[in-house]
Amino acid sequence: MTAVVLLLLFLSVFSSFSSSASPPPYPYDYILVNYGRFTCGSDQFGPGFSNDTDLFGRSWQSDKDFRSTSDESTVRSITTRNTITNTDQGPNYFPMKLYQSAAVVGGKHLEYELQVDAKLDYLLWFHFAEIDSSVTRAGQRVFDILIDGKNVKRIDVFKEVGSFAAYSWNYTVKNLSSNALSVKLQNVVGAVLISGLENYALVPADVATVPEQVVAMRALKESLRVPGRMGWNGDPCAPSNWVAWEGVSCQQNKNGTALVISGIDLGSQGLKGFISDQISLLSNLVSLNLSSNSLEGVLPSGLGQKTLRRLDLSNNQFTGPIPQSLATSNLHLVLLNNNLLEGQVPEELYSIGVHGGAIDLYGNKGLCGVPSLPDCPLFWENGGLSKKGKIAIAVSCVLVFCLVMLVLYIFCIRRRRNDYDFGLPQDLTSLSAKRNRYQRQKSLMLLEMESQHAKSLTPFTPQ
Ligand SMILES: *[C@@H]1O[C@H](CO)[C@@H](O)[C@H](O)[C@H]1NC(C)=O
Ligand SMILES: *[C@@H]1O[C@H](CO)[C@@H](O)[C@H](O)[C@H]1NC(C)=O
Ligand SMILES: *[C@@H]1O[C@H](CO)[C@@H](O)[C@H](O)[C@H]1NC(C)=O
Ligand SMILES: *[C@@H]1O[C@H](CO)[C@@H](O)[C@H](O)[C@H]1NC(C)=O
Ligand SMILES: *[C@@H]1O[C@H](CO)[C@@H](O)[C@H](O)[C@H]1NC(C)=O
């Protein structure tokens, strides 16, 4: 019945509002989230309800359903067609129609009960206009506003703006203790009158999570198959005092311009997927707990950001080697026990235990190479050739090459000395000289023969 329609209209026009009374948790503006916008003494109007226009597209609900005044018969509606001044003006452009009607209570008081979320602060806007022409001077209609029983303001509309003029007043409610907010108008002189009431949740417009970390978190949501019940929707961190993703903790970055992921705690959640390698984008991650799930696959090589201090992946089915990135991080606690990991444990990682931290590798049959674990097969580590193995192969290659050269030397170079003379031998030069000589002689002979032959063919000419 009194359920407030959460239109969740984010009014950009108000978003630059910030409370000076008490500094917000973050040095940022608020987003005003509509928790109720009522027109008093009239039917609902605005987009979706009627053809009445509102410059900002606001819809105004009738206040009837939100009144908790015990005696409804004391509530009257009054309306006017007169022009109301100070309406449809910047910055808020409240429509004149809002002030052309009012709820009036001649009895003791008029009370509204508003549904709220106790975690948030609320901004209440009260709208008044003296539209009863019988009120002609200040002091003829005076009433108090009480919020959750506390008297916060005395109102005399005529005194403020005269008649047929809009008068708005706002109040911020903090430290709520329940999910119902009582707003009471208590008469002092004459009847209580109100034209409209708005209730906005002050959601800190705090800065979103760093975009690449949002990308990483969405990838993890997919890969870890995080169940819907954990509410991993929207921004992982913001708005910070509203709803962050379950199991996710966030911090402001260094200059306070964005939020970053500092912890993921999803132990014993029945997860069945794997760790996306996008986790390397979480460059501010301090703590990661995925223990006691049914996660599989290899540990991504980007796991182990410099910030990472605590890593609990125990009691899963992770396979493959421990990535070298874990060895170079600043881990203080590493629980990898009861998985299916294999290969050489990086020595730097093992030394965490020596330097006052804790490491547990128990129950991984394939891990090797540090005290209390079996030795690794020669030249084999992290599921591939070890550095030593590579050096060994390089050395063998060099040796084989040398051997081949030696053999070549023995079979070719040394035999040359005995059997062949690869230099230009004296004989050969003289041979070619001889041949040249022979050739020259031969061509001379040919020339002679041809010329004689030619002579014999030419007709004889007596000398
Ligand atoms: C709004 O205007 C349209 C056309 O101008 C009309 O058909 C409709 O009945 C109007 N609605 C109301 C609630 O007056
Ligand atoms: C609330 O009212 C005060 C004056 O009482 C005004 O300075 C302030 O701007 C109002 N708040 C908003 C959001 O306009
Ligand atoms: C709200 O509560 C905080 C701490 O709980 C306190 O410091 C502050 O004074 C309270 N503000 C009001 C307006 O009561
Ligand atoms: C804040 O720091 C981030 C990096 O952490 C940087 O990209 C950003 O430009 C900084 N913003 C300001 C306003 O200094
Ligand atoms: C990780 O989560 C499990 C289950 O929620 C919990 O028992 C364990 O203590 C956590 N590990 C660390 C290092 O806090």
Image (spheres, rainbow, N blue to C red):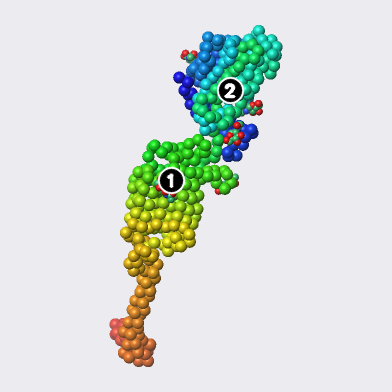
Q: Which amino acid does the dot numbered 1 rest on? A: Asp
Measured as percent of width and height from the top left, residue 77 is found at 56, 10
Mark 2 C-beta to ligand 3 under 8 Å: no
Q: Which amino acid does the dot numbered 2 rest on? A: Gly
Residue at 49%, 40% (x, y): give it: 237
Residue 265, disc: 1
Is residue 379 positioned above or below 188 on the image? below
Residue at 35%, 74% (x, y): give it: 396
User: Which quadrant of the structure image shows residue 224?
Assistant: top left
Q: Is residue 34 visible?
A: yes
Mark 1 C-beta to ligand 5 under 8 Å: yes
Is residue 211 positioned above or below 136 on the image? below
Q: Is mark 2 on a helix, strand or loop?
A: loop
Q: Residues within 10 Å of mark 2 (few under 14, many from 20)?
A: few
Most foreground residue, 77 or 406:
77
Quadrant of the snapshot with the C terminus: bottom left
Measured as percent of width and height from the top left, residue 444 is found at 34, 87
* Label tally: 2
Residue 149, disc: 2
